[in-house]
Amino acid sequence: MPQLLLEIFSEEIPARMQQGAARDLERMVSDRLKAAGLTWEALTTYAGPRRLTLVIDGLPAATPDREEEVKGPRASAPEQALEGFLRKTGLTRDQLTERDGVLFAVLSSKGRATTDLVAETVDQVVRTFPWPKSMRWGSGTLRWVRPIKRILCLFDGKVVPFEIDGISSDAITEGHRFLGSGQPLKVSDFVDYRTQLEKNFVLLDVADRKLRILEQAKAACAARGLALVDDDGLLDEVAGLAEWPTPILGDMDPQFLALPPEVVRLSMKVHQKYFAVRDPSKDGLAPNFLVVANVEATDGGKALAAGNSRVLSARLNDARFFWDEDQKVGFDAWNAKLSGVTFHAKLGTLAERVERIAALAREIAPLVGADADEAETAARLSKADLLSGMVSEFPELQGIMGGYYARLAGHSDAIADAVRDHYKPQGPADTVPTALVTVAVALADKLDTLVGFFAIDEKPTGSKDPFALRRAALGVIRLVLENDLRLSLIRFMPATIAHALTYPDRENAEQAVTLALALRDQFGIPSAQVAAEESLALLSPSRASEMVAQTSDKAFSIAMEVSTFFADRLTVLLRDKGQRHDLVAAVFALGDDDLVRIVRRVEALAAFLATDDGANLLAGYKRASNILRAEEKKGSLPTGMVQTGLHNQPEAETTLAFAVGAARTAVEAALETEDFAAAMTALARLRAPVDRFFDDVLVNSDIPAERANRLKLLGQVRDVMGQVADFGQIAG
């Protein structure tokens, strides 16, 4: 079957946009062709510095004939409705069919030549392409990321004729800007197209460009006993900058290795797109760099390497200036300036944020086994480097530079490491800190962010999350789980809530104090209690009671919202690991916010429900719950002790009553020691008695005493199982 080949050739496309553009081209073309009824064997797109290419194999020569039935008005509908339907379909009344009193129109259309459809499709795609940024050029109205030079479009080896804003389609492409023949390349199909491009120094596939870069870069380094420092992000970028990438190894002044390696690497990467190089026999970087050129130099790249070395030296001299100047300034000056930097209009300055993080870190530290003084000190230093010259130049180095400056200032390794790593983890692939002081500060930083923004009602909505709160919540969860931390997150929320609800009206001391009182009463938090007691003299008892009533509910509501948000994020995390979302909901419904305990419960629950006993007991629970729910709606659900040994009491009822009592004792003992597997085992023993009860016993007995006793028994079954999880939230 015929092949479609499309190339849109333009000036240089930014590397960061290329792969997204390839996906958009595939989506837009395939959606339009599918809508016309076309199918194909294979569709592939390619993106490079100057071209977007699409090739479809096995595309039919024409779209299929189509027949569509359209439902119209009822036969008894007013005449105006019928006339409107006839105008819409282009048919007459006698061409309609009637079924069950409803009129239908059968619309038939002949297939179209694929070339006509392709011409329309390319025009629509080019005119509506979703570039992040686009431009107009000349006197035309067309917008594209950069000026379009050519459009190659072949179907079955022949040009598909069309014109877009003065650009006519043809069978011509161009090779490398400098290394190619300089002549237009006329092609006949995709194989010819790709072959001619490679002969003219253009690698069409980004995977081929990456492979060429890695192979030649590693070979160049190995020839001098060096090794390339891997950087996948940089590799993706440089593969989009060169059509014929040629790695060249250069030298730099060894004196620059006195700078932190992160500074050297980032300066190379951000400003020059160079790869760093290391000496395998030593720690740290080597005084070299690797640049990917877009040409093959006649001198082997010596001149290019020398020129790039001079440019790099200028960049690293700037970095060294910032490094030297920052050491003259120091933390006191930077922290003093934080009071002039707004974190958020409703949450105060960075200086106030640092105070909150420091207080939280000090509270968290003993619970994670960290030194409280070190945690507080690290927190107070954590944001200072944001005012340093180096971080102003390289924002990516926030925290990292603070760690270096903390060591130079004489602080301990624990404090310096905490300053360096407190932003971690910043994503699902980022490492999780394990150093105790770092964990305390990282938790404090993320909890303050989460609670603060929830308190001012700046929560994520849909796909929008401008303050990266989902990432912060996931960071907290990973810190807790991967360090096996046993703590209640809700206890660390009140201080931040108090700040958020009283800022910017901080001169209202009454509001701050009474909110602290409310939080102390609601959560029993020592820090809130101290804050309240220090200023208690400002309030009369009646005024305090009045304001506590006003603020307590709001504070509790915010804390519950944050807890629910954690539940949602934990659900996503566990779902990615294969756990069911309803099991997480069933465990969270118990009101526990110890994440480690929650995960262990979920794992034990999943294992239990995977057994026959678990699945059947769940079915029994659902049946019991339905019966009890119906009674609760009547408002007549009996309570109290279940009686045994009654006259004519079925054996199955007695057996279940004793089984529930034994299960309750076993479950409570297992939960006390957090042996959730044992708790599930205890529940499993209920399976047979529950099954037998429903087989042998009529719950809705005509005798009121019997019916009440059996309802109480089912209530006890529900209560015992409810100690482990809310089985009502489990599907099945």
Image: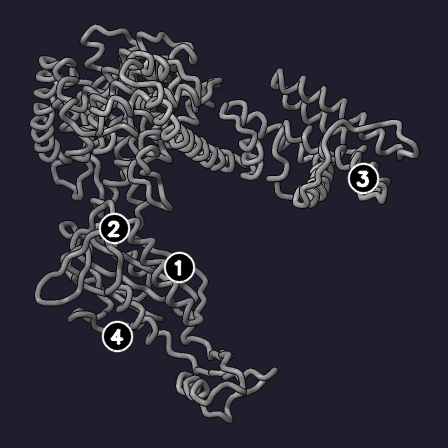
Left or right side of 302 for 697: right
Left or right side of 106 for 725: right
Cα–Cα span, label 1 and label 4: 21 Å
The three-letter code of the residue at mark 2 reads Gly
Q: Quick one: label 3 or label 2, which is nearer the N terminus?
A: 2
Q: Give the class, few, some or many, for how many residues have Cα within 10 Å of label 4's Cα (few <14, many ≥20).
A: some
Q: Quick one: label 1 or label 3, which is nearer the N terminus?
A: 1
Q: Which residue is mark 1?
A: 43
Q: Which residue is mark 4?
A: 161
Cα–Cα span, label 1 and label 3: 68 Å
Q: Quick one: label 1 or label 2, which is nearer the N terminus?
A: 1
Residue closer to the observer: 418 or 58: 418
Q: Residue at x 18, y 20 (%)?
A: 385
Q: Which mark is on residue 707? A: 3
Q: Residue at x 61, y 31 (%)?
A: 725
Label 4 residue SS: loop
Residue closer to the observer: 384 or 241: 384
User: x and y percent of residue 411 in the render?
Assistant: 24, 7
Cα–Cα span, label 3 and label 2: 77 Å
**Mark 1 or 3, which is nearer the eye?**
3
Cα–Cα span, label 3 and label 4: 84 Å
Q: Give the class, few, some or many, for how many residues have Cα within 10 Å of label 1's Cα (few <14, many ≥20).
A: some
The three-letter code of the residue at mark 4 reads Pro
**Mark 3 or 2, which is nearer the eye?**
3
Q: Which mark is on residue 215? A: none
Residue closer to the observer: 46 or 223: 46
The three-letter code of the residue at mark 1 reads Leu
Q: Which residue is mark 2?
A: 48
Q: Give the class, few, some or many, for how many residues have Cα within 10 Å of label 3's Cα (few <14, many ≥20).
A: some
